[in-house]
Image (cartoon, grey):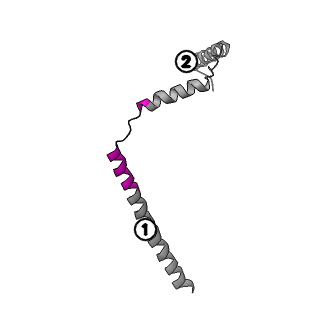
Amino acid sequence: MAKTSKEKATTSTRKRLNAAAAAAPKKKKKKGSLREYFKGVKLEMKKVVWPTRKELGSFTAVVLITCAAFAVVFWAVDTGVLAAIKAVCF
């Protein structure tokens, strides 16, 4: 199938752009020092909004209650499945 003039122009433009990109000097990535890394970490940690003591206590309570609830649910399901298996197999 023959290419249209628009497809030929697009192909030639793409080739020129690829050639220009290949000829352009590649920028070297600046290798940061360990000190610079920790400076960045310190700056980011200053931006963090920390919870208050009251919020932290309530969040902890929610997590503990949720863990306990899931433990009870898993225990109940496990006990039920074990009872069903014993009823069927033994």
52 magenta-colored: yes
Q: Residues within 10 Å of mark 2 (few under 14, many from 20)?
A: few
Determine which quarter of the picture holds residue 30: top right
Q: CA distance from mark 2 to mark 1?
A: 66 Å
Task: Provide the major secondary structure of the magenta segment.
Answer: helix
Q: Position of residue 69 (x, y in %)?
A: 40, 64
- Going by the image, does 48 lie left or right of 9? left
Q: Dot 1: what SS?
A: helix
Point 38% across, 38% down: residue: 50
Q: Position of residue 26 (x, y in %)?
A: 65, 16
Q: Dividing the image into 4 quarters, which one contains the C terminus?
A: bottom right
Closest to the observer, 53 or 39: 53
Q: Which residue is mark 1?
A: 73
Q: Dividing the image into 4 quarters, which one contains the N terminus?
A: top right
Q: Which residue is mark 2?
A: 6
Q: Position of residue 51 (x, y in %)?
A: 36, 41
**Magenta-drawn segment:** 46-63
Residue type, mark 2 in image: Lys
